Each structure stands twice: as C-alpha cells, then as structure tokens.
Amino acid sequence: MSEQKLKVLVIGSGGREHAIVKSCLKSPIVGEVVAAPGNGGVAADARCLPLDVTDVDATVKLALSEKIDFAIVGPEVPLCLGVTDALQAEGITVYGPNKAGAQLEGSKVFTKDFLNKYSIPTALSHTFRSGQESEAVQALSQYSYPVVIKASGLAAGKGVIIAQTQEEATAAIKDMLSGEMFGDSGSEILIEEFLDGEEASITIMVSGDQYVYLPAAQDHKRIGEKDSGPNTGGMGAYSPAAVVTDEIQKQVVTRVIEPTLNGLIAEGIDFRGTLFIGIMIVDGVAKVLEFNVRFGDPETQVLLPQLETDPISIMLDCAKGTLNAESVVVKPGYAMVVVVAAKGYPDAYPKGELIEFPADVPENVSIIHAGTKLTNEKTIVSNGGRVLGVTAFGKTLKEASVDAYKICDTIKWDSKYYRRDIGYRQLNREQ
Ligand code: AMP
Ligand code: GLY
C-alpha cells in the first residue's frame, strides 16, 4: 500500500457506482474520489465529471487530465470495449478486467465454449450464426419447453428469451439472427436447455489465480411480488443467501471457480477484477448460467457493507497483483437492498419527479442513488427506472428487512414503486 493517498476515478452512473463511491469515502487509502458521470446522489458525495462511458479515448483523456492514480470501472460496456487496456497503457492502475477477460461477459458463445472446454457445469446448448436460421430452428426439436434463446453479445440484460412454445422460440431465433432484435449482439445465438432451480449470485474479486470469495447473494429480477411480471435489472437483493449452502459453496469453488481461474491462465488471460457468477442450483448441483465481469447491481449494495476490510484496498490489491485473500474479513450479519423504482418500469415511466428524503437515516441504513439527478436548485429528481436502493445491515435478515422498509416507506415521490417481499424465500424459511 502506498503512503500517499490515492486519487480514484469511479466510472459509471448507477447504484453500484454510488455504493463504490461511498466505500471510497470511508477508505483509508483514498485521498480524493472523482466520479464520471455519476448521478444525483453521487454528486453529493464526490465531484462528478461528464463522460460517455462508451468513449474509451474520452475516458483516458479524463483520467490523465485529472491525474488519476486508480480507476474502478463499474459497468461491463467499457470493459468489453477495452477501457482497462487503454488506461493501463497510460500507466493507470485499474480494477476491472482487460478486453480479453471481459469476453466472459461480452460473448456468451465464448463463455459457453470456455465452460465446455474446462468441463465446468452449465446448461446444454447449441451455437448458431447469422445465415443459420433454418439449422437453428431444426435444432429446437432436440429441446423441450420452455427453451432458452440467448443473443451472444451485450444486450443490456435483455438478450435472454425464455420461449414457452416452438413458435416463440422460432420467432426469437429469427429476430435475433436477422439483427432485428439486438443488432450485431444477436448475430450469434445460443439455444440452451432451460434449467429449473433456484438462482444465486456468486461474486469473487480476482487477481490472476488469487481471489476473495464474497458472501453469496440473491437478486429478485421480476418487477412484481412473488417473482411475477417482466424481468428487470434487479428489484432487490440480500446476502448471505442461505440457498448457497456450505456444500454448494464447496462445489462452486472446486467445480466452477478453480477451473475457471486455471482456464483463464491457460488461455493467457490475466484477469483482475470482479467475476460475478450467476448460478442455477438444480437438484443440488450448481450450474453456471452466466459470467459477468463486474459487480452486480443491486448485489454490490449488499456486498460492500458486509466487508470489514476496506473494499477499495482489496480492489487495489487485485489490480496490482498483491492480493492476500486470507486477510480479508467479512462481518457477521445480513444485508438487504430494496430497489425503489418509478412506476411503469421496466416499460415507460415518468422522470423528473421531485424526491423527498427522510431527515434522519439510521447508521445501519444507506440510501443509494441509481437513477437520480441533482437539479440547479439542488433538489433531487427521478431520472431512471430504478431510482434508489435502500440498503440496510442487521444481525438477522429480518432486522435488515425491517430497517430497509422503514426508510423505503418514508421516501416520497409521485411514482414511487417497490416490491415489499425482498428476501421472501429465505425469510419464510427462517420462520
Ligand atoms: P443471463 O444473462 O444468461 O444470466 O440470463 C438472464 C436470466 O435469464 C438469468 O438470470 C436467468 O434468470 C435466466 N436464464 C438464463 N439462462 C437460463 C437457463 N438456461 N435456464 C433458466 N433460466 C435461464
Ligand atoms: N443484478 C444482476 C446483474 O447485475 O447483472
């Protein structure tokens, strides 16, 4: 660890990045934090600079002109575009994998080939490219329904269609391969067996062959209570998730994490950043649904508060190759985040509505901003579908839930909407 405190750049504008900025403010190694572009809540905690995060050159220029020591990349798009490689080329230390490593999220076909090559458990699948519509439709006869059709490239979390019938599957294949649905991201697709089980998010912070295993989390992807209605970016999460038992964790470590990190090294990929592993537990077996190469959103909001060790120091050690995973300490307890969204999300929803916040928020609770904007009058207005995330930490999951919901209830704006049942599976089991 350097004596001199670091000037840190946090790239991104969501709840995940606000949570990272908050960790920076508490970190003993951070002297100053700059966020780009940030959001209304981040602006209250850090200096925000405008940035199009898909513009790698502009990101490098900003980092150089700000004399940034350490950049933390939140979202996947800049990672897949090679922002890490570009920043590193200028001598800037970066948390977040290089372009080669980011393929684990940027290409589902790359990942499926990787998983199969290293015998890592995953759903059975077939790959097709544009021009192979009829072969793809024919292959459907080998699957039962529902069947999963996936665009290989990045599609802002929308590239997965769970088709209930052959007609739906055929339409999805055609729409994706023609480029109509996801442009180039759909020029390669996977047809995949549907896995019926319980989903969990495993997050590790990686530095080559070293890693820190963070507590497992469970997200709630559907907009409605009891997991009903359309998929969203995530409506709330809690951690540790008991569905990842010690036995499942052992399996994930030996059958997924170890072969993945060894496989990356064998492929010549020096991975330094977050590896988020979406798993489905089917009859006691953990299978990989997807890899992401960045922290989950909203999972980050429940993972960082559980770390006794300074998360920014862990990120820096991952980036520099000085990680000592054994020294990382996780606090006992439970964290929950409830996402407070704008009514209408994930379809059309209003923006620009004034948000009123409670005067006092207890120390174990924090209000993380995702889709908000600071106005010229210094008020905060809604500016996205997922607007806020209320995170609480407690001795039990019940305590965390009660404290998070108390604050959700006191936040006010016209189109406020949130699920009231985050953590219901585990809470029901505990009763
Ligand atoms: P992915 O982007 O691959 O994680 O897919 C997004 C979501 O689709 C996952 O979080 C799962 O809920 C669901 N999903 C993806 N693949 C499968 C599958 N093979 N079986 C069942 N659900 C899936
Ligand atoms: N919460 C799921 C994700 O970040 O991809």
Image (tube, grey):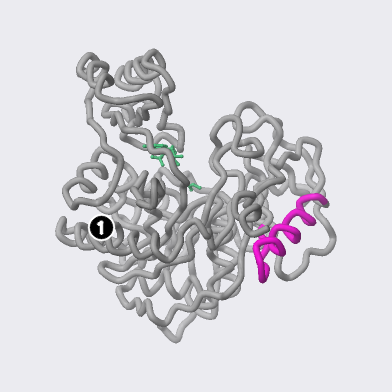
Residue at point 27% right, 53% down?
Answer: 101
Image quadrant in which the N terminus is located: bottom left
**Residue 158's spot in the image, x, y percent?**
45, 32
**Residue 423's spot in the image, x, y percent?**
62, 52
User: Which structural element holds mark 1?
Assistant: helix
The stretch drawn in magenta includes residue 403? yes
Residue marked by disc 1: 260
Residue at point 43% right, 57% down?
Answer: 202
Give the left or right position of residue 183, taking residue 46 as reference: left
- Ligand 1 sits in which quadrant? top left
Does residue 164 appear in this view?
A: yes
Residue 144, picture quadrant? top left
Report crowding for label 1: few under 14, some 14 to 19, many 20 or more residues within 10 A (C-alpha): some
Does residue 57 appear in this view?
A: no
**Residue 103's spot in the image, x, y percent?**
28, 46
* In this view, 198 is above or below 69: above
**Residue 113's spot in the image, x, y percent?**
20, 43
User: Quick one: 73 or 7, which is closer to the camera?
Assistant: 73
Instruction: Write the start and end of the magenta stretch as one range.
Output: 391-409
* In this view, 249 is above or below 428: below
Give the left or right position of residue 208, taking residue 294 as reference: left
The stretch drawn in magenta includes residue 307? no
Would you say the beta carbon of the disc 1 residue lies within 8 angstroms of ligand 1? no
Residue at point 70% right, 61% down?
Answer: 398
Q: Main secondary structure of the magenta part?
A: helix
Task: Identify the amino acid type marked 1.
Answer: Thr
Give the left or right position of residue 9, taking residue 204 as reference: right
Q: Residue furthest bottom?
A: 3
